[in-house]
Image: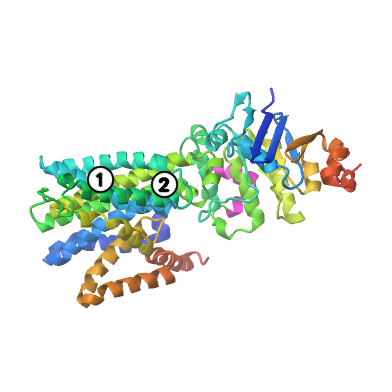
Amino acid sequence: MRALWKKNGITVLLLLAGVVFLLLFPVLGDDLYLLTVFSIALMYSVYAASWDLLSGYTGKENFGHAALVAIGAYSLGIISQSTPLQPILSIPLAGILSIVWGILIGIPTLRLKGPYFALATLAVASIMEKLTLSFSEVTGGEEGLYGIPFLAQDFVPSYYFVLLFAILSIGFLFFLGRSNFGLTLKSIRSDEDAARAVGISTTRYKVTAFAISAGFAGMTGAISGHYYGFVGFDMVFPLSLNIIILSVVGGLGGILPAALGAFFLTYLTELLREFGEFNQLIYTGILMVVVLVLPHGVFNLLGDFLRRGRKHGVTGR
Amino acid sequence: MALLAVENLHKQFGGLTACDHVSFSVERGERFGILGPNGAGKTTLFNLITGFIRPDSGSVQLQGKPLTGMKPEHISSLGLVRTFQIVKPFKGLSVFENLKVPTLSPRMRKRLKGEREREKWIETIADLSDLKAILQEKVDELPHGYLKKLEVAKALCIQPEIVLLDEPFAGLTSSEIQPISTVIQRANEKNGTTIVLIEHRLKEFMQLVHRIIAIDYGQKIAEGTPGEIVKNPLVVESYLGKGGADLVGP
């Protein structure tokens, strides 16, 4: 903790200021529209952070993160049709189910080298997408499933619920990434054979990372179900690609850059609505420029910049 | 009992016999050399011993324990570690972090309790490998000579019984070879680590090893001390050429 503070003082202060702002936001005004935007942006941050733990840290790009979200969201949606599940029960349940799913899918697929893991995850998500449509009596098909208990009676408590969940989840993933576990994942990203040569069971680490990643994706999926009171096809399956874009623009392999990228890009999408039919064009333009000019991600670069500024002042290196 | 016993190890890649019923054994504390022209099957032999490739037949035993069929991470966790000819540093990480990864293997988790002991051990190895001054540097910016040293240091970090070094001098100038040769000698003499070495830099190689096997076309063609090997007609013909005897001096 102390090392973190010493090296990244300014970054830590900025983050704290951001958290305080989000905590005070409902008190300062009653902009329900922005409150909703922030809630959604926070859920996307957790998606991105959870994706980053596997894909950013080990380099195994998951092209089907939506499948994990779907496990959480749809298990809640389907159970809610007969028994309304309260968040206190549904979130841990969604977490457990998606962890189990992550392990089952991870064990066979994470042995694959090169782009084959990405293809396998893409395939799993597409199969689930098709099955969701085929079994529409159970899944609601394109209509989706209604009747899910809301997170809370009002917008403000819902917002605080999502905010607290996001802070805890992203914080957990961030410190996990900085731990020895995260270091081992990074060694796998750099060279899997070299990691095995020094005694690291790389498959076990990758499957564990996938399971944790899946757990947070699934829990967030359930939370979004509660937030909208609804689970639907279009809410879940387009996420796979979105999450990758959000994380890559923010920056990989550090949890926070990906999470911040997701938050601000989601917010940006809302701002761009003003431009009407041009919003997609502008959004895509911004993405292309960012990827071309800042290939390591906006927030990775910003973090480096803040660190370097301090380093010059203190140690003169 | 020999520390490492390789018996009748055989591997065929299609029509090519990469390893042809090779047998040899390495005693504890030895510095053992494997000699042979390019493509003779030396690296394949390392890959077969360390579990990266499965042999068609034959066996490998470490302290009498059969390793055949085990995964590389389990073999290294038993104390048989290899390095790679083309260095494989963990990019994006510091030298310290590179050395920390091996300490997170099951073998070292048993031997080092907690972060303090881990850090001390890493410092010991960094000291032994002359990397202490650059522990906090990112490996991406290091010159090749340091990366070669780091490759050896990473292997030593798992406190191995035996290290297989695949051309630790390749790509280095003569002045860069001495420091890394010193590190290898120190690991052997101070820590008692057994060394198996593949190398093409013959002068340095001959000075470093006690015993040698020579390999050509996947077959063992000779075994002996450096003095015996340089006079062996088969080795001279396949690899050394006529000036071979000068390599070990009178």
Q: Is residue B83 magenta?
A: no
For numbered disc 2, what is the local secondary structure?
Answer: loop
Residue A138 placed where, x, y %?
A: 16, 44
Q: What's the residue type where badge 1 is placed?
A: Ile
Q: How many marks?
A: 2
Residue A223 placed where, x, y %?
A: 19, 50
Residue B125 placed where, x, y %?
A: 60, 43
Seen from the viewer's position, the closer of residues B65 and B192 is B65
For numbered disc 1, what is the local secondary structure?
Answer: helix
- Left or right: A228 in relation to A288: left
State which mark lies toward you, 1 or 2: 1
Q: Is residue A232 above or below residue A212?
A: below
Instruction: Work out whether mark 1 precedes mark 2 in sequence or the reverse, and give the earlier one.
Output: 1
Q: What's the residue type where badge 2 is placed?
A: Ser
Seen from the viewer's position, the closer of residues A33 and A14 is A33
Q: In which quarter of the image is the N terminus of chain B?
A: top right
